[in-house]
Image (spheres, grey):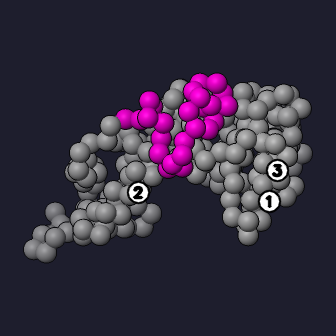
Amino acid sequence: MAEQLAADLARAGVIVISGLALGIDAAAHRGALVVGGVTVAVMGTGVDIVYPAAHGKLAEEIVAAGGALVSQFPDGTAPRRHNFPARNWTMAALSEAVVVVEAAEGSGALITAEAALDLHKEVLAVPGSVFSPLSVGTHQLIRDGALLVQNARDVLAALGVTQEVLDDPLAPPKSLGIAPPSGRDGILAHLSDVLPLSAAEIARKLQLPVAEVLVRLTALELDGAVRRHHDGYVRALRSGQKRA
């Protein structure tokens, strides 16, 4: 959901701001990058120290795509627990609206939401399962008056970009979508039978939402035209074919 929201919003020209952390933060950055959008990472370290270190490549992609790495801390500042609540306030200050996708009780996402409210910024939240502890915070926000988010158009309406609100949670805004190529050959043209590509990489190449690419990949997999390989997809060899 975070990746889909970020992709649809970035396609509409919205700059996606997140915190470069594992999970939803990274998904938001990647969603924007997949469609060629701009995203900004607000860091709890100096800009010369990427944390977590596994996101070094993601940080490079953000800058290469015209985004930025931003920090209120001087170069050389290592990750410290007390840095991140301050980082969350900075994210809220830089944003016109804050969207909380998941939040356990007492999570950092709720600190960002609290900061946004104090700064008179719009707060929106994505509902989840009533059985999930990760939705406790978002449901609390909605109960207390945060706008409910099903899709990008809900966020755009809050930003005053459009008055439309989606009835279909998976459909991108009509005015912002790109006509997909006919059939599923566009995906096959980008796959080899040896080197796997992830759904996000394929979506970036085709300029399509990740959700749409996953639907097409599933259909191709059922047809026997592609198969999963490690963390990605490759073309499936038909009987009688041999690898080069």
Q: Which image quadrant for residue 76?
A: top right
Q: Which mark is residue 207?
A: none
Residue 166 in view, yes or no? yes
What residue lies at 40% left-to-right and 61% top-to-bottom?
Answer: 232
Tell me which label, 2 or 3, sits earlier in the chain.
3
What residue lies at 37% left-to-right and 49% top-to-bottom?
Answer: 202
Q: Which image quadrant for residue 222?
A: bottom left
Tell me which label, 3 or 1, sits earlier in the chain.
1
Q: Position of residue 8 (x, y in %)?
A: 51, 38
Disc 2 versus disc 1: nearer the observer: 1
Q: Which residues are magenta?
A: 154-178
What residue lies at 86% left-to-right and 49% top-to-bottom?
Answer: 81
**187 or 170, nearer to the observer:** 170
Q: What residue is shown with label 2?
A: 214
Tell me which label, 2 or 1, sits earlier in the chain.
1
Residue 60 in view, yes or no? no
Q: What residue is shown with label 3?
A: 143
Callout 1, which amino acid?
A: Val
Callout 2, which amino acid?
A: Leu
Real-space Cα separation, disc 3 to disc 1, in angstroms: 11 Å
What residue lies at 68% left-to-right and 59% top-to-bottom?
Answer: 128
Q: Is residue 26 left or right of residue 146?
A: left
Disc 3 versus disc 1: nearer the observer: 3
Q: Examine the structure image and report whether residue 176 is included in the region drawn in magenta.
A: yes
Q: Which mark is residue 136?
A: 1
